[in-house]
Image: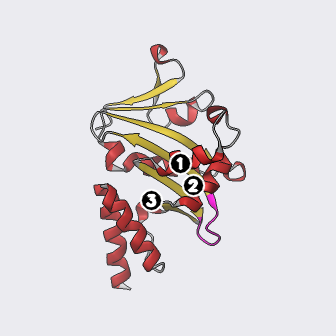
Amino acid sequence: MRKLEQESDVIEQLWQRGRPEDLRAIRVLCEQQPEVLVPECLRGPGEAVFCAAPDSKDAQQVALLLAGQYWTQGLTEEELGAAQLGSNVWLVARDAKSRQVLASARALSDGARLAYVLDVIVRPDRRGSGLGTALMRTLLSHAHVRNVRDLRLRTRDAHKFYGALGFVTRAELGDEMVRLGAR
């Protein structure tokens, strides 16, 4: 049991450090040893587990969730999937038993000055469960996001949700919200 706990600690440290190779290492560790204890930083509410290094199968499921949303109009499922895979930081919440994607969030970041949160989505039957908040808190804890000075996102209808996470609306930004001084 101690070895599993140590490996769980390694995964958490890799997540906190946040280099691209760290996300790949997390994926390899989790795939090679699925019995590894999920570190606290990658546990969601209920039986949800956050995957820090999603794959193309996850991208397909997320593309289906995103299809038809107001912010994805005009994009194909292929484009939506490619966008997920091209992100600096991308998390999916999965049901631990079925591996079905329950939620997703991603960020593009330069790691210092600016990051942009995109495509935050929770499956309709899981909304209101705290999953979206937990997923966002985990995304915001990643080094590429937590260390930036200017963290932005756009929304038409989730101001209250993002406001609870420290984002504010600035009139000059239109429907864009910002969380300044994230450091």
Question: Which of 163/88 is in front?
Answer: 88
Q: Mark 1 or mark 2, which is nearer to you?
A: 1
Q: Which of the two discs, 2 and 3, labels the residue nearer the N terminus? A: 3
What residue did someone put label 3 on?
Answer: 52
Question: For residue 102, which quarter of the picture?
Answer: bottom right
How far, Cα to Cα, is label 1 from label 2? 7 Å
Q: In x, y percent, where is residue 47?
A: 59, 66
Give the quadrant of the C terminus.
top left
Q: In x, y percent, where is residue 89?
A: 42, 49
Question: For residue 150, which quarter of the picture?
Answer: top left
SS at badge 2:
helix
The residues colored magenta run 95-101
What residue did someone put label 2 on?
Answer: 59
Q: In x, y percent, where is residue 32?
A: 43, 79
**Is the stretch drawn in magenta largely helix, strand or loop?**
loop
Q: Residue at x 44, y 47 (%)?
A: 87
Residue 82: image tag: 1
- Asked if residue 127 can be seen in this view, the reply is no
How far, Cα to Cα, is label 2 from label 3? 13 Å
Q: Are marks 2 and 3 in contact (CB under 8 Å)?
A: no
Is residue 129 part of the magenta span, yes or no? no
Residue 108: image tag: none
Q: Are marks 1 and 2 in contact (CB under 8 Å)?
A: yes
Give the quadrant of the N terminus.
bottom left
Residue type at the position of mark 2: Ala
Q: Residue at x 67, y 53 (%)?
A: 126
